[in-house]
Image: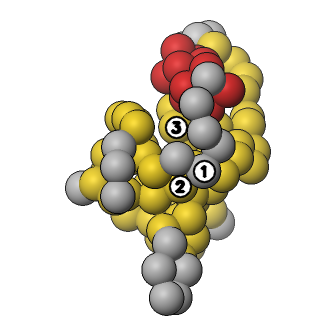
Amino acid sequence: MEVKCVLKCCVDSKSGTSERTGNQWQTDEWLAVIPGPREKKIKFEVRGIDRCREWQEFFNNMPEKNAPVLIRFEIDARCITKDGKESWFNSVEAWNIEITTW
């Protein structure tokens, strides 16, 4: 999937070390705005240390802060089981971003 929007800011960043593998990990959450008569906001997750660094550099080096961007992403439902009870939530993971035009 893809959407044209305006990338506003990184709203959260989490990192750590996997208990299972011992590998470092990072997840950043980015807020984007889809302009229109009824403006919409969407929060994207960006996963992986290198990808998070790329997105931060992209944002810092944008020629214009409110420039339109094209974000490609995937939506997936994920399940967490705690105390034998399942909880489901949607994950919106972005994997590509580029400057575009309206």
The three-letter amino acid code for the residue at tag 2 is Val
Residue 87 in the image: state x and y as whole percent: 53, 71
Circle 3: element type? strand
Q: Left or right: 6 with respect to 56?
A: left
Along the viewing direction, whichever of 70 and 54 lies nearer the viewer:
70
Assess disc 3: are there few (<14), some (14-19) or many (≥20) residues with their C-alpha within 10 Å of its C-alpha: many
Residue 17 in the image: state x and y as whole percent: 69, 18
Circle 1: element type? loop
Residue 66 is tagged as 1
Assess disc 2: are there few (<14), some (14-19) or many (≥20) residues with their C-alpha within 10 Å of its C-alpha: many
Residue 6 is tagged as 2
Q: Which of disc 1 and disc 3 is earlier in sequence?
A: 3
Residue at the image position 73 percent from the left and 35 percent from the top: 14
Residue at the image position 43 percent from the left and 46 percent from the top: 69
Q: Left or right: 102 with respect to 67?
A: left
**Against 50, is 94 above or below?**
below
Occupied quadrant, residue 1: bottom left
Q: From the image, tell me which residue sits under label 3.
A: 46
The three-letter amino acid code for the residue at tag 1 is Asn
Res 89 seen here: no
Residue 57 in the image: state x and y as whole percent: 61, 20
